[in-house]
Image: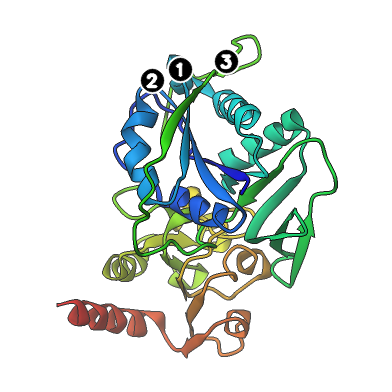
Amino acid sequence: MAQVLVLVDATTSATVPTTIGKLTAELLAAGARLGEPAAVVVGAPGTAAALAPALGALGATAVYAAEADEVGTHLITPEVAGLAAAAAVADPIAVLVPATVTGREIAGRLAVRLGGGLLADSVDLELADGQVVATQSVFGGEYTVRWAASQSAGPAVVTVRPNSFPVPDEPAAASPEVTTVELVVDPATATKVLAEHPEPVGDRPELGAASVVVSGGRGVGSAENFAVVEELADALGGAVGASRAAVDSGYYPPQFQVGQTGTTVAPQLYVALGISGAIQHRAGMQSSKTIVAVNKDADAPIFEIADLGVVGDLFTVVPQLAEAVKARQA
């Protein structure tokens, strides 16, 4: 079977990670549908060796180490160069990267460098007649399409939407061999990081990769009232999101916006509180496995896609729901 390269996280720091993100596990599961998943670690020297056992447990049959001290000081370019170097050695059928802001940039540059087709924001993958076929949700989720890259000189480069591929419960028994590939970062064409100013994220799960997301909309009424949204999210062990209307009203920071112009999520459970369900918001969350909506307007569009809808005052319903969840966990 041909190899499928998977980018391990999107390393932007020289610090050796101690854990592997959920997105990496999902990409390896997706890669197993096409061939033999092989992890590409772009990081500081020693990163790949430290992560190899855990990557093997997630199903990686091989590990490619693209390592250099410059990785943590440059944007995008090291990942593109590392994946290209691994592709030159592995001759893969596809290269998978997460459909995040950074991942999309990496994928576009890599597809040009390898001469391969780009399949964006994929929610399913299969191999048909030797071609990588991706499924994508388009036009705000109104349609689902299947597409494949035309004949090209390089492998298909695929961005995969988070939470689209289930991760196996049982660890794999693979003991991947670590192969070193040359990573060359040209300072003349690379963007150097001079300072980092990360947005505060707290101790909740990362929004784009969370399996549970609880979002609030204009109906929450104020920034102070978002405590109700946060309480339910914490009870469910989920991330907090917000509609564009809530963000524009100043109720919650913009990095937590869910929607077409924010973060696209596809968790196992999505809870919409006080969100009417405008198409901009629905486009960013309607691929969620289960959708629960609470809104006092019985005609709100969000109920058209909700698996469970509650017509009522969220300030009455949500505290009771949070208490019930906590009681079940006790």
Where disc 1 sits, the SS reads loop
The reply to whether residue 283 is in sight is yes
In the rendered image, residue 139, in percent from the top left (x then y), is placed at 75, 65
Point 59% across, 79% down: residue: 302
Q: Report how far apart the C-alphas of labels 1 and 2 lie in the structure.
A: 6 Å
Confirm or deny contact between disc 1 and disc 2 (CB under 8 A): yes
Q: Residue at x 54, y 59 (%)?
A: 258
Q: Dividing the picture into quarters, in which one does residue 123 lie?
A: bottom right
Q: Amino acid at mark 2?
A: Pro
Q: Is residue 135 above or below residue 202?
A: below
User: What whole-number distance in Å separates the C-alpha atoms at marks 2 and 3?
Assistant: 14 Å
Q: How many marks?
A: 3
Quadrant of the snapshot with the C terminus: bottom left
Please state the horizontal and vertical placement of residue 169, each as a whole percent of the image: 36, 65
Q: Which residue is mark 1?
A: 68
Name the residue that disc number 2 marks: 45
Q: Nearer the viewer, residue 79 or 269?
A: 79
**Label 3 amino acid?**
Val
Q: Which residue is mark 3?
A: 185
Dot 3: element: loop
**Can you give x and y, in whole percent of width and height, for residue 183 in the image?**
54, 19
Residue 161 against residue 69 in the figure, above or below: below
* Residue 20 visible (yes or no): no
